Amino acid sequence: MHEETRWIDSHAHLTMFEPEEVAEVLDRAAARSVVGVLVPATGPADLDRALGLSADHPDRLVAAVGVHPHEASSLDAGLKARIEGSLGRTGVVAVGEIGLDYHYLNSPREDQLCALAWQLDLACEAGLPVVLHNRESWTDLEAALASRQGRLRGVCHSFTEGAEEALRVLELGLLIGVSGMVTFKAAANIRAMAATLPPGRVLVETDSPYLAPAPHRGARNEPALVPLVGAKLADEWQLRTGEVAARSTAAFRELFAVRDGWAG
Ligand SMILES: [Zn+2]
C-alpha cells in the first residue's frame, strides 16, 4: 500500500500576499501536495483579511484570530469584541497568532503579558487551540502556559528554544511547530531540538512570507515550500518523507479539529 503524501502548512501569513495572487499561491502549493494552510491574523489590520481568505477558500484555508505580541498595545475593548465575535465563524479554528516577543519589544512587556493572558483565557473558554509566538521570552511564556495546564491546547510555532524547553511544551500539552529554519546551515541547534521530538507531536510550517527554507533562503517564502521542511525532519528522524507528512498532517487535523473533507 502506498499512501498519498499530503502536507499542511500550519503557519503562513497569506494576509501579507497580494489578494489577487493567493489563488495561484494555493495552486502552486497543491502542485507540491500541500493541500491545506492555516492563516494566522496578527492584529487589527489583517483580522478581516484572514477571515475573508478562509471564507473565500473554505476547502484549503483555515484561520486563527488574535493579536501578535508586536501589536499587543492595540488590544482595546473594540478589538476584543472583534476577536470574540469572529470565533464562531466558519473556518476559524484557533486563537492566534499570540505570544511574547522581548527581542523587538514593539509593544511594552506589560501590554504583551496582558494581551497574552486575555487571549489564552479566551481560548480556554472557547475550547479552541492557540498558535503561539515566542522570542527571548520563554520564562514568561512557560509560566503563562503552566498556569493553564490541562485546559490549553495549541502549538508553539517556529520554535527556536532548546530540546529541554521543547519537551516542556509537549509536557504542557502543546505541539511544536518547525519552520524552514531547520534547513539553515547555522541552525544545528534547531535540528538537534527537532531530533529529540516525537514526530507525531510536530507540525510543519513555512511562516510565509518569512524564513524560506534552503535552497531558497532569502527569497519570499510560500506554502509550496513546506515539503522542504518535512524532508529535513525526515533526515533527522530517519523516516520516509511520506511518513513525516502523514504524521504532521494527522497531528494538525487533530489539534485544529478541521472538518472531514477539508483539504481532502
Ligand atoms: Zn507568524
Image (cartoon, grey):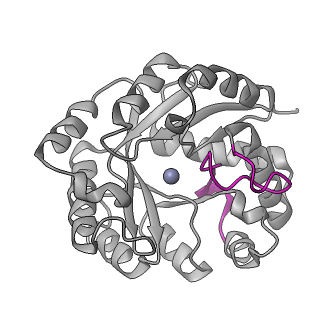
Quick check: 73 left or right of 13? left
Residue 133 locus on image (x, y percent) = 45, 61
Seen at 39% across and 37% down, the residue is 46
Residue 98: percent from left, percent from top:
37, 56
Q: Is residue 10 above or below residue 105?
A: above
Outermost residue to the top: 56
Q: In this image, 97 relative to 178: left or right?
A: left
- Relative depth, front residue between 12 and 130: 12
Left or right: 15 in relation to 263? left
| Relative to 228, residue 173 above or below | below
Total residue callouts: 0
Res. 41 image quadrant? top left
The dominant secondary structure in magenta is: loop
| Residue 35 sits above or below residue 238 on the image | above
Task: In the rendered view, tell whether residue 166 sits above or below residue 219.
Answer: below
Quadrant of the snapshot with the N terminus: top right
| Residue 39 horizontal/vertical position (percent) | 50, 38
Asked whether residue 171 is drawn in magenta, I would say no
Residue drawn at (59%, 50%) of the image: 207
Q: Quadrant of residue 108?
A: bottom left
Of 193 and 47, nearer the camera is 47
Query: Which image quarter holds the C terminus?
Result: top right
Magenta segment: 197-221
Residue 205 part of the magenta-drawn span: yes
Q: Residue at x 58, y 47 (%)?
A: 251
Query: Which of the pair 251/188 is nearer the observer?
Result: 188
Q: Quadrant of residue 233?
A: bottom right
Q: Residue at x 55, y 24 (%)?
A: 262
